[in-house]
Amino acid sequence: MFMATITTYAAAETAALGHRLGCLLGPGNLVALVGDLGTGKTSFAQGILDGLGISSRVKSPTFALVHEYRGSEFPVYHVDVYRLNDPSELEGLDCREIFFGLGVAVVEWADRVYGCLPSDRLEVHFDYGLEDDARVLTFQPFGDNYREMVGRLLAPA
């Protein structure tokens, strides 16, 4: 299985990498973010949304579960399932539209709802690095389009 790892050394660098990924995303894409508290998932998600042209202040949706943003051509969903104890708690949301629709979905704590997500997706795993602000991001693409996307993300500018 193809995986790629990148280490960032500041929250701004993590967000900038998210921005680059956001510029590559389009309708129907889902990015699943997995990692412990404080590993950079929300900074990365904010960068993704910025790369998608979402100019409003992006907040973590921990208390609302989902924030929907209207991009220029398609909706963007920022989902945070940290507070869920069981995937069945998603029943009140339109998960079909969010996870399988024509928008872009960015899901924090995605490992809590793996069974609800499409099999084709990009997973990004976040870990603490050796230095204080270092974060290790491991990209695991599921599906040919996501493998190509990661290749483009990692290609020299």
Image (spheres, grey):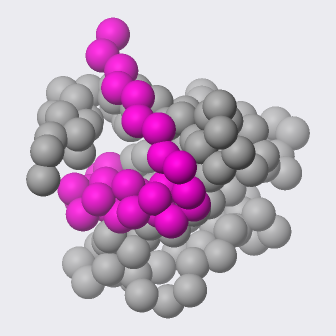
Residue farthest toward the front in the current orientation of the protein: 131
The answer to whether 12 appears left or right of 42 in the picture is: left
The quarter of the image holding the N terminus is top left
Horizontal and vertical percent for residue 95? 56, 52
- The picture quadrant where one finds residue 112 is top right
Q: Relative to 132, say whether 43 is above or below.
A: below
The answer to whether 121 appears left or right of 143 in the picture is: right
Q: Is residue 3 magenta?
A: yes
Q: Nearer the viewer, residue 19 or 53?
A: 19
Q: Is residue 126 visible?
A: no
Horizontal and vertical percent for residue 97? 45, 58
Q: Nearer the viewer, residue 92 or 43?
A: 43
- State the residue at coordinates (12%, 53%): 157
- State the residue at coordinates (65%, 39%): 131
- State the residue at coordinates (60%, 28%): 115
Residue farthest toward the top in the current orientation of the protein: 1
Q: Relative to 70, say whether 18 is above or below.
A: above
Q: Is residue 50 magenta?
A: no
Q: Nearer the viewer, residue 111 or 139?
A: 139
The answer to whether 42 appears left or right of 143 in the picture is: right
Q: Is residue 129 visible?
A: yes
Horizontal and vertical percent for residue 94? 57, 59
Q: Relative to 41, say whether 119 is above or below.
A: above
The answer to whether 54 appears left or right of 116 in the picture is: left
Horizontal and vertical percent for residue 68? 53, 75
User: How many tags in the picture?
Assistant: 0
- State the residue at coordinates (14%, 45%): 156
**What span is in magenta?**
1-29
